[in-house]
C-alpha cells in the first residue's frame, strides 16, 4: 500500500473521535453532510443500495476509489481510473439532471494531484481531502448539492476542542492494548450532583488472573472519584445483560426492533435504529427546538414488563452550546458554579431535569404519555448502551407506543429495541469486585480510597492524571457467559477562564422554559451558515 501524503498522527484517540463527532454536529439533515465523515464513507460503501460510486478529483484527473476502510486518520481504498459514466461535474451550473444515477455519486476533492498512471491500494490522509460533495434530494423533490469544506471544519475543530466537556475517560486492557471504553459520570458537575454510574466493558479481558483498566483526566477539569468497582454478571449462554440507571441487572434474550420508528417531523428512522453502526439520529430538525422519536413495538399478549434498550451518546454540539452558555457568566463563572454547588442535591437535580438536556422516555397508557425515565448524560465521545425498564400493566393493546424526547441536537440515538425476557434471580450470578490495586500517576497506592462509597475522594486535578486499577478475577460458573461493568461514583468540576463581565440580560432569557433548546437551535443555524453552499452556486 502506498501512502500518497504524509502527515502527523493525532496524539490521542479522543482527537479522532471528537473530529468525527464534529461532522455529526454540522449535519444539515439526517441524510446529507453527516454521512460524509471518513468513517461514514466506509459505512456508505458497505450498506448503500444501490451502491455509492466514489469519485476522487486530483487536479484534472478523475479516479474511482473502492474497498474503503479506516486506518488511524487515513481513508484506505483501492484507487483506479474511472470506468463508466460520471454524471456530476464540478463545472455544472444547472440542476436539470435527467439521469438520477447522479444521486449515487460522492465526490472527494483532494488538495494535491495523483499521477494519472497510479492505481492500487492507497492511503488518503484526511487533512488532504479538501472537500466532499454529496448529491441528494433537497426535500422539495429536486436535486441539490451539499458542499463541505474539510479545511474549514478542521479549523473549527480546534476551536471546538477547547470547549468539550469530557467526563472521566475509561480505558480497558483487551489482552493486547488499552482500548477506549467510554465516559463515566456524565453531567455530574459539582458535588451536589455526585452519583453512581454503570459502564459496560465488553472489551475487558483477563490477564494472569487480573482485569486492568485506567481512568484518566484528559481536559481542564478536577475529577473526584469515590468508588471504582467492577461488577461481574454471569448469565445463561445465548443471553446478555445490561444495568439500568439504578444499578439493577436485566437479562436480554430476544431483542425486537420497532414496527415503526418516526421522528417528530415524520422522517422514517427505523432502519437507522436497527444497527449499531454509528448511523445515528441526532434530534436535529432545524425547524423546531424540541425533537423526538416515536417508537411502536409489537407486544406479546401476556407481557407485563419489558426492557427498552438504547444505544446513545450526547452530541458534541451539546458541549459547544453548554460552553457558549457558560461563557455568558464571564469572569464570574467560578462564583456562579460555587453558588450552584450550595443547592441541595435534589433541588439541583430537579432544576436540570426541568430543562431539555435529558433524554426523556415516555410510555403511552390509556391514550396519555407517561414519563418513565430521564436519562443522565453519557458523554459525547462514545456510544453507550442503556436500559430502561418498562411496566406494561394496564396496556391491553397488542402494540406498545414509546416517545423519546430531548432538546435540539443534545443526543445521538443509534439503536432501539425492546426485550420481554423475564429473568429469575437464580439465572444471574452477580459479583462485586473491589480493586486489588489502584496506582495513581505519582505511583501512590489509592486502593483504599476507591474501595467504598464513603465520600473519601481521589482527586485528579490536572490534565494527564490517571489511575491504573487491577481487579482479581472473580469466581466463574461453568457453562455461563460473563459480562463486566464498571460501577463508579463521583463528580467533576469544570475549569474555565472566561473574560469580561456577565451578560445579565442574555442570562435572564434562559429562565423561560425551553430557552436552552431554542438557544441550541439558533446557535447551530448561525454555526453552519458559512459552511453550507447549495448548488447552483
Image: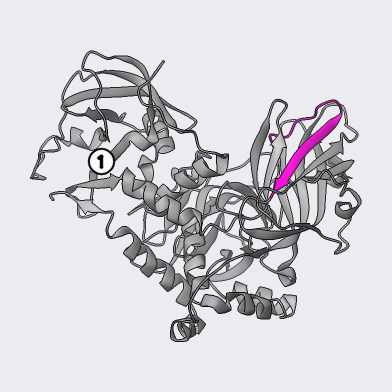
Numbered disc 1: secondary structure: strand
Q: Quadrant of residue 471?
A: top right
Numbered range of the magenta stretch: 202-216
Where 174 falls versus 526 (above or below)? above
Q: Is residue 484 left or right of residue 274?
A: right
Q: Position of residue 488 (x, y in %)?
A: 77, 53
Q: Position of residue 536 (x, y in %)?
A: 12, 49
Where 535 falls versus 64 (above or below)? below
Residue holding disc 1: 133
Q: Is residue 44 left or right of residue 223?
A: left
Quarter of the image for the N terminus: give it: top left
Can the viewer see residue 301 in this picture? no
Where 170 falls versus 67 (above or below)? below
Q: Position of residue 132 (x, y in %)?
A: 28, 39
Residue situated in front as seen by the camera: 236 or 398: 236
Q: Position of residue 325 (x, y in %)?
A: 49, 72
Amino acid at each position: 500500500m502506498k501512502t500518497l501524503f504524509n502527515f502527523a498522527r493525532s496524539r490521542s484517540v479522543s482527537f479522532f473521535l471528537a473530529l468525527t463527532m464534529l461532522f455529526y454536529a454540522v449535519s444539515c439533515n439526517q441524510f446529507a453532510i453527516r454521512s460524509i465523515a471518513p468513517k461514514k464513507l466506509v459505512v456508505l460503501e458497505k450498506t448503500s443500495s444501490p451502491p455509492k460510486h466514489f469519485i476522487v478529483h486530483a487536479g484534472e484527473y478523475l479516479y474511482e476509489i473502492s474497498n474503503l476502510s479506516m486506518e488511524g486518520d487515513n481513508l484506505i481504498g483501492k484507487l483506479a481510473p474511472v470506468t463508466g459514466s460520471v454524471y456530476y461535474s464540478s463545472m455544472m451550473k444547472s440542476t436539470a439532471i435527467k439521469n438520477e444515477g447522479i444521486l449515487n455519486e460522492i465526490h472527494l476533492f483532494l488538495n494535491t494531484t495523483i499521477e494519472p498512471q497510479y492505481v492500487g491500494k492507497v492511503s488518503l490522509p484526511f487533512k488532504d481531502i479538501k472537500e466532499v460533495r454529496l448529491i441528494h434530494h433537497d426535500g422539495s423533490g429536486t436535486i441539490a448539492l451539499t458542499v463541505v469544506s474539510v479545511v474549514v471544519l478542521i479549523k473549527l475543530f480546534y476551536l471546538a476542542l477547547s470547549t468539550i466537556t469530557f467526563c472521566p475517560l475509561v480505558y480497558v486492557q483487551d489482552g493486547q492494548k488499552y482500548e477506549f471504553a467510554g465516559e463515566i459520570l456524565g453531567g455530574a458537575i459539582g458535588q451536589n450532583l455526585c452519583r453512581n454510574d454503570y459502564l459496560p466493558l465488553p472489551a475487558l479481558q483477563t490477564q494472569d488472573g487480573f482485569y486492568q483498566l485506567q481512568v484518566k483526566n484528559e481536559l481542564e477539569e478536577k475529577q473526584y472519584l469515590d468508588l471504582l468497582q467492577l461488577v461481574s454478571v454471569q448469565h445463561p449462554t445465548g443471553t446478555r445483560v445490561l444495568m439500568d440507571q439504578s444499578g439493577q441487572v436485566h437479562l436480554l434474550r430476544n431483542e425486537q426492533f420497532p414496527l415503526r420508528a418516526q421522528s417528530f417531523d415524520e422522517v422514517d428512522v427505523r432502519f437507522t435504529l436497527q444497527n449499531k453502526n454509528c448511523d445515528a439520529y441526532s434530534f436535529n430538525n432545524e425547524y423546531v427546538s424540541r425533537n423526538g422519536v416515536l417508537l411502536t413495538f409489537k407486544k406479546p399478549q401476556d407481557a407485563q414488563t419489558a426492557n427498552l434498550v438504547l444505544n446513545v451518546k450526547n452530541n458534541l454540539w451539546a458541549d459547544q452550546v453548554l460552553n457558549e452558555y457558560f461563557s455568558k457568566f464571564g469572569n464570574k463563572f467560578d462564583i456562579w458554579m460555587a453558588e450552584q454547588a450550595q443547592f441541595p442535591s435534589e433541588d439541583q437535580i430537579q432544576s436540570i431535569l426541568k430543562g431539555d438536556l435529558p433524554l426523556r422516555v415516555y410510555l403511552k397508557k390509556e391514550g396519555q404519555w407517561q414519563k418513565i425515565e430521564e436519562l443522565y448524560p453519557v458523554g459525547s465521545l462514545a456510544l453507550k448502551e442503556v436500559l430502561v425498564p418498562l411496566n406494561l400493566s394496564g396496556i391491553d393493546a397488542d402494540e406498545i407506543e414509546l416517545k423519546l424526547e430531548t432538546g435540539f441536537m443534545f443526543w445521538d440515538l443509534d439503536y432501539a429495541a425492546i426485550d420481554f425476557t423475564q429473568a429469575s434471580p437464580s439465572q444471574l450470578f452477580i459479583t462485586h469486585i473491589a480493586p486489588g490495586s489502584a496506582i495513581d500517576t505519582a505511583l501512590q497506592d489509592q486502593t483504599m480510597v476507591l474501595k467504598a462509597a464513603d465520600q473519601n475522594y481521589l482527586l485528579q486535578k490536572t490534565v494527564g492524571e490517571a489511575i491504573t486499577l487491577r481487579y482479581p478475577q472473580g469466581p466463574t460458573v461453568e457453562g455461563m457467559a460473563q459480562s463486566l461493568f464498571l460501577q463508579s461514583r463521583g463528580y467533576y468540576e469544570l475549569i474555565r477562564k472566561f473574560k469580561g463581565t456577565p451578560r445579565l440580560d442574555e442570562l435572564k432569557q434562559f429562565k423561560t422554559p425551553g430557552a436552552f433548546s431554542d438557544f441550541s437551535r439558533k446557535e447551530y443555524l448561525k454555526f453552519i451558515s458559512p459552511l453550507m453552499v447549495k448548488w447552483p452556486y
